[in-house]
Image (cartoon, helix red, strand yellow):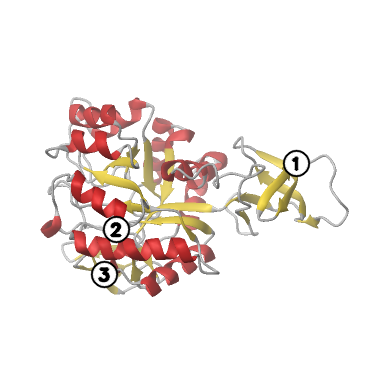
Amino acid sequence: MFYTNARIFTGDFTFRTGAFEVTDGRFGAVLPQDVPEDAVDLHGATVIPGLIEVHSHGNSGFDFSDGDYAGLVEMARYYLRCGVTSFAPASMTLPYPVLKKAFATAKQLSEEKPAGCSVLRGIQMEGPYFSYGKRGAQNADYLKDPDFEGFRQLYEGCGGLVRIVDLAPELPGAVDFVRQAKELCTVSIAHTDANYDQTKAVIDAGATHLTHLYNAMPGIHHRTPGVIPACAESGCVRAEVICDGMHVHPASVKLAFRMFGSEGMILVSDSGRCAGLPDGTRFDLGGQTATLINGVARLADGTIACSAANLWQCLTNAISWGVKEEDAIRAATYNPACALGVQDAVGSIETGKQADFIICGEKYASK
């Protein structure tokens, strides 16, 4: 089947108007010279790759860490309705047996691939290797130092689905953990009070990801630069940023794109089970109670917790705030695919890749 008269976000991260082909579930010719007369006319609509969410805990009243397969299926259906065609659910700081149960549901979903669901491409293991002082909404009762053997067992137990594992660089054993874990998956810096040298040490050891930039880490100071400058100057670290309009100011989002460049940014929602639910909803977050008030989820002590947004909203937010459209789309498609190691299959509109794309409607932010 051919689609024509489309504004296509092509594999070189630019927009071009023309046609593309889909054959047996994969992209055929992109911008072909000859287009059959029966091609579907998209009337100038914008076509982009399916969005890829690498940091979302839940939605629709469900959380990945519940270990509830039926709930995970409902989460995956919600993602697809929001244009998120691939996702890697994020776990919380919880005991290993709880994580093992949740990871088993991810393995089941990745194998069964039920209809009407976003495709599960991996897991982000957010915790328990975090700093107490920068734990944010993570449960302090379950924090631990980096433990490669424990991680390896969880990794193998779910068939290697953990594609991103998080840790605080200043914890004992962090550097050794990174050296070993990088051979299995992407290692991310997160929930940390590390200084510049500690951060550089884990980057040198192989860390290439930064979880929710600005949140749960020290700010930038000209005499104590800390985590953010160490990551930005490395040239090898991709940084997530939450674009719900609550966690990070729009000006700081634009600054992040300047610091890390178009190739170094990943848009995430960091949504919890409150996403898609009404204001005033009270819900469990890793064994703690949170409440959604005026679009912001907070713990009882006022700590900002997860978001109530989805990745499509984050993408349109970023564009409306002044992030270049091409850069924002790349940060919601190709870059997260790279973080999960699935860029050869999805994340861009290129011949031979899975025909995973979105036809954007009239309310698309660029129009």
Question: Can residue 221 be seen?
Answer: no
Q: Residue at x 33, y 72 (%)?
A: 68
Q: Quadrant of the N terminus?
A: bottom right
Which numbered disc, 1 or 2, marks the residue that appears first in the sequence? 1
Mark 1 against mark 3, which lies toward the viewer? 1
Q: Is residue 110 left or right of residue 8?
A: left
Label 2 environment density (alpha carbons within 10 Å; few <14, some 14–19, many ≥20): many
Could you tell me the amino acid type at mark 2? Answer: Ser
Residue 254, image x and y in percent?
Answer: 43, 39
Query: Would you name the residue on which mark 2 appears?
Result: 91
Res. 341 in view: yes
Which dot marks residue 291? 3
**Residue type, mark 3 in image:** Thr
Q: Is residue 94 above or below residue 274?
A: above
User: Which of the pair 300/96 is nearer the observer?
Assistant: 96
Residue density around tag 1, few if under 14, some if 14–19, many if 20 or more, within 10 Å: some
In this view, the residue in front, 50 or 331, is: 50
Asked if labels 2 and 3 touch by Cβ distance under 8 angstroms, the answer is: no
Q: Are marks 1 and 3 in contact (CB under 8 Å)?
A: no
Q: Secondary structure at mark 3?
A: strand
Q: Quadrant of residue 244?
A: bottom left
Q: Earlier in the sequence, mark 3 or mark 2?
A: 2
Q: Count residues near mark 3 (Cα–Cα under 10 Å), then give few for <14, some for 14-19, many for 20+.
A: many
Answer with left or right where residue 34 lies relative to residue 113.
Answer: right
Identify the mark nearer the N-term, 1 or 3. Answer: 1
Pick the residue in front: 275 or 184.
184
Dot 1: element? loop
* 86 in relation to 164, above or below: below
Residue 314 point in image, percent of width and height = 45, 53
Which residue occupies 55% across, 69% down?
115
Q: Which mark is residue 31?
A: 1
